[in-house]
Image (tube, rainbow, N blue to C red):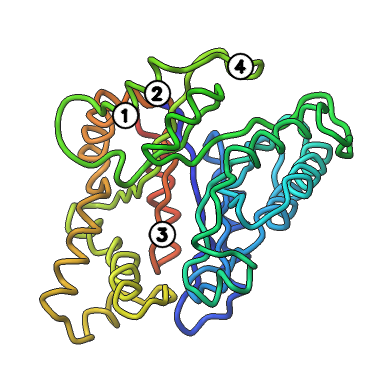
Amino acid sequence: MKLSILDRSRTRRGVPDSAALTGTIERAVRAEQLGFHRFWVAEHHAVPGIASGSPPVLLAALGARTDRIRLGSGGVMMPNHQPLVVAEQFLMLEAMYPGRIDLGVGRSLGFTKPVREALRRDRDAPDTFADDLDEVRSYLEGKGAVTARPQVTSPPPIFVLATRRGLDFAAKAGLPVVVGGPVLGGSGTRVPELDRYRDSFVPSAGNRSPYVMISLEVMIAEDEDRARELLLPEAWALAQSSRTGEFPPLESVADIRGRAWTSRLREQVDASIVTSIHGTAEQVTVALDALAARTGADELLASTSTFDRAALFESDRLLSILDV
């Protein structure tokens, strides 16, 4: 599998939000030095725990600090944008950093009702994702009703952040997919949704074959207990969001240990950590080999976060040298 990173510019308790963005830039520079294939950033709006609301702006900064690594969005949420504007943004990025830009797109709405209202989005509005994506694609390929500028030699490739239903759409459209969460759940030797995606894939101009990228947290440390501990801040934040409706900044392990834990919180934290791959380098290698066998994945997009930046960078380093 190719190895790549998704960084969501996670904020940290007691630290300015700007530090999350400079941390993302530093991580991208290190990822290139370590030989990772891609480095992607995310789009979240009005979320205390995430500083990145505009992938194109952040990608422009990353491109200026790196030379070779592919840069992309994981992803741009199409319900929030006009297709022409998305195309123009990514054509500009491609013109500035040729051959290095990816457009990952998703269909998620804002996290809360006030955010959706601020984005002028109604949860009950018609789902126009397929039409919007076709329109973006037409502009990128120079076939739209108007000509998006700047024109480039080769348009950036599109990736679909897919649920089960999204996989069917991506197969029909002949696009590569990024999957995680529910699609990867369950047991068995194979993931039937991914096999169906491959079987029904219709080759397109830019994609002659199906392509599957798996996104999940991967944490490597000196032992399994330490790796699990490093996953605690993200799992704790996720559990808190389900209780309060607000996704908070990361907190240190020591601070989290000192909080009051309910049995429900503990169950939620454990359920979150169990979906990740973590442990020593040897344990993670075995787990990733098993994941590759079960999914047939072409690429891993590690979406790992933790409060301790030094530990995160060390986990990235150890991941980059795995034989998977």
The amino acid sitting under disc 3 is Ser
User: Who comes first in sequence, dot 2 or dot 3?
Assistant: 2
Tell me the residue that label 2 is attached to: 197
Q: Mark 4 points at which residue?
A: 204
Q: For this view, does 263 lie left or right of residue 64?
A: left
Q: Residue 305 carries which label?
A: 3
Q: How far apart are marks 2 and 4 (CA)?
A: 14 Å
Q: Which of marks 3 and 1 is nearer the N terminus?
A: 1
Figure check: 243 above or below 104: below
Q: Is 260 left or right of 80, judged from the image as shown? A: left
Picture quadrant of residue 249: bottom left
User: What residue type is disc 2 on?
Assistant: Tyr
> At 89% from the left edge and 39% from the top edge, which residue is drawn?
149
Q: Do the residues labelled 2 and 3 touch (CB within 8 Å)?
A: no
In what element is the residue under mark 4?
loop
Mark 3 vs mark 4: which is more N-terminal? 4
Q: Are marks 1 and 4 in contact (CB under 8 Å)?
A: no
Q: Around disc 2, counting alpha carbons within 10 Å, would you say few (fewer than 14), some (14 to 19), or many (20 or more)?
A: many
Assess whether mark 2 and mark 1 are in contact (beta carbons under 8 angstroms): yes
* Label 1: which secondary element: helix
